[in-house]
Amino acid sequence: MPVALRLAAPADFATVADLAQRIWWAHYPAILPAAQITYMLERGYSQAALRDLVARPHGGIALAEDGEPVGFAAWHGVPEPATLKLDKLYVLPERHGEGIGRLLIGHVVEQARASGCRQVILNVNRQNTSAIRTYERCGFAIRAAGDFPIGNGFVMEDFIMARPLD
């Protein structure tokens, strides 16, 4: 069955949170301490957090499915002019390499164009080399590095990547 994308509704937020839990615990323990993973999942995937994300200007979440959910992407506008932020992009590890991430990025790029944006930006952990390579293959380039305190004593050590839109 081919992978299809659809916009997530509030009724899908529990599915998004479940996917995030499964994917993060499979991937991030090699990069982040367990306490930070737990904190970030609680902070970013509560019903309220997901509702706030889609309520932002140009905000949305897309689910990738092929009979069952296999990944998702989330995006929203930012104060930087003509810019959309790819805020979340996750695919089940057993589905990596199938083009699902590329499909989700393409969807976010379409949302950016439809919103009149000229670029898409994202933050990625500097140790997340597999994601960085994926983003580079999809036209993103590292624009800057930054350390971003997120509360509870945790700091996100990220690259900011950007993809200009033609």
Image (spheres, helix red, strand yellow):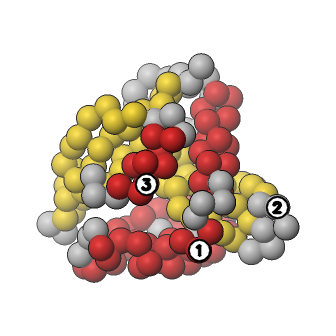
| Residue found at the far top of this picture | 166
Name the element at disc 3. Answer: helix
- The quarter of the image holding the N terminus is bottom right
Say which quarter of the image contains residue 145.
top left
Residue depicted at 54% across the width and 40% down the height? 138
Asked if disc 3 and disc 1 are in contact, CB closer than 8 Å, the reply is no
Pointer 3 or 1: first along the chain = 1
Say which quarter of the image contains residue 105.
top right
**Type of the residue with mark 2:** Pro
Q: Tell me the distance, in whole angstroms, between the alpha carbons under discs 2 and 3.
A: 23 Å
Instruction: Say if 114 sits above or below 54 in the image.
Output: above
Residue 106 spot, x, y in % from top left = 65, 41
Pointer 2 or 3: first along the chain = 2
| Front residue of 165 and 111 | 165
- Residue 76 visible, this orientation: no
Q: Which mark is residue 73?
A: none
Q: How many marks?
A: 3
**Type of the residue with mark 1:** Glu
Label 1 environment density (alpha carbons within 10 Å; few <14, some 14–19, many ≥20): few
Residue 71 spot, x, y in % from top left = 62, 64
Q: Is 139 displayed left or right of 43 in the figure? A: right
Name the element at disc 2. Answer: loop
Q: Which residue has dot 2 on it?
A: 2
Q: Is 72 displayed left or right of 145 in the figure? A: right
Q: Tell me the distance, in whole angstroms, between the alpha carbons under discs 1 and 2.
A: 16 Å
Q: Which residue has dot 1 on it?
A: 94
Pointer 1 or 2: first along the chain = 2
Q: Which mark is residue 131?
A: 3
Residue 119 spot, x, y in % from top left = 50, 27
- Residue 27 visible, this orientation: yes
